[in-house]
Amino acid sequence: QTPTAELQALDAAHHMHPFTDAEGLEAKGARVITRAEGVWLQDSEGHRILDGMAGLWCMNIGYGRDSLAEVAARQMKELPYYNTFFQTTHVPVIALSAKLAELAPGDLNNVFFASSGSEANDTNLRLVRRYWQCKGQPERRIVIGRKNGYHGSTMAGASLGGMGGMHVHGGGIIDGIEHINQPNWWSDGGDMSPEDFGLARAKELEDKILEVGPENVAAFIGEPVQGAGGVIVAPDTYWPEIQRIVDKYGILLIADEVICGFGRTGEWFGSTTVGIKPDIMTIAKGLSSGYIPIGGSIVSDEIAQTVGAQGDFNHGYTYSGHPVAAAVALENLRIMEEENLVSYVKNDIGPYLAEKWHSLADHPMVGETKIVGLMASLALTPNKETRASFASDEGTIGFMTRERCFANDLIMRHVGDRMIIAPPLVITREEVDELIVRARKSLDEAYEQVKE
Ligand code: PLP
């Protein structure tokens, strides 16, 4: 057995993979990733792979940054751990909270830390219900999410999210959570204009609020740009209408910024990109560029003061505000600022990728192409006019294309028949060119297999 085959056999014997196609794993074994630098991964067979997904949408500053390792080592020697329960705190968590308050829009000045986006959304569910209890309206406990939204894999995360398959596998969802449709014009818009469709989908929020009773609704949660649902960019009319509706009924707005946050959309936060004013933002991923697990909720002054800014909320994780994670996140944010990565996405590499990405629309099976900042999707279709999907086996063409990308040493993900990318924010123009060459080649190869 080769060293790779040995590793794969051990992996198959003992490692339970998250979200992995079991058949593919059994047939081919898992690809063993050994090193990474910039936007490039290396596997145990020596392949250099272009990471078009920034890991899981998180590696914003790119792989191989020594200073993050140095900061982590220094912090581990000085204070590897202490908690922030029971009136204690420490310098990294203080500095990171203040920095996030400075970066976040409006009066989002208060941070409750977790170790992941899922945990942070658990916090949010409990926090909004606690908020309404403190306001003397404990019946306000329903949170409305969206179909195909993704908010994590904990019980609350999976329930707030609208992935049907996840609801089934977990044995249903927890009580007090409702879902409305996603604003996916390409698949659901029919004959409507994108503008009318955006309004119609936003109106579903009002319908749902009236159905369950406004006095029972605590919050609405959504990703400014739906990520794992297929990089679904809502029509321009959508978010202003959502904001109007939550304002009208006095419902809290939670923006899940786990993917959109920290430069991905060309602003520090996707909420600014789509023009909404959330009461809570969920953060993770790009906060530390994936170098260390950390997430959190950035919360308005009103909510923080109502539930008790000094910790009068029976909630917390052993690793809330972990000093090493906080120090690494701070260093990550320092690099993002020093290198002007947010404006690089907005004014330079984002527009460059957009032009190249839209050029793929001339491919015979590429329909809609969408991009915001450095998150992009394209819809695969046998008929661009009718926007048909490769119907009976929806997802298959996406899977085949993803496999061709894999074979061509490009990581591109598929969600049903949409292909998506979200490369590290540091990607260069030459690397974008390379990404597009490999994507087109993979599309060609997949198309060869399905045409006729
Ligand atoms: N929210 C969004 C929008 C996400 O995309 C994710 C993960 O992909 C999560 C929450 C969950 O974050 P985590 O995997 O860190 O728990």
Image (tube, rainbow, N blue to C red):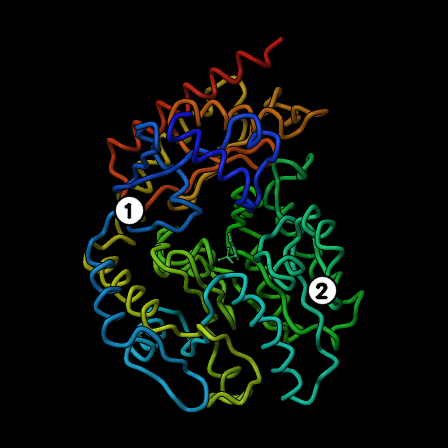
Q: Is residue 100 above or below residue 312?
A: above
Q: Is residue 41 above or below residue 317?
A: above
Q: Nearer the viewer, residue 154 or 442?
A: 154
N-terminal-most mark, 2 or 1: 1
Quadrant including the N terminus: top left
Residue displayed at 60% across by 52% down: 149
Circle 2: element type: strand
Residue displayed at 28% across by 77% down: 79
Task: Give how far across and how far down residue 278 sits, in percent.
Answer: 51, 68
The three-letter code of the residue at mark 1 reads Tyr
Residues at circles 2 and 1 in contact by the CB criterion of under 8 Å: no
Specify few, some or many for label 2: CA neighbours under 10 Å numbering under 14, 14-19, or 20 or more.
some
Task: Give how far across and how far down residue 428 sits, in percent.
Answer: 24, 38
Left or right of 323 in this view: 378 = right
Q: Is residue 168 above or below residue 4?
A: below
Quadrant including the C terminus: top right
Disc sitting over residue 63 in the figure = 1
Q: Nearer the viewer, residue 236 or 33?
A: 33
Left or right of 116 in this view: 193 = right
Disc sitting over residue 177 in the figure = 2
Task: Give how far across and how far down residue 21 sits, in percent.
Answer: 59, 35
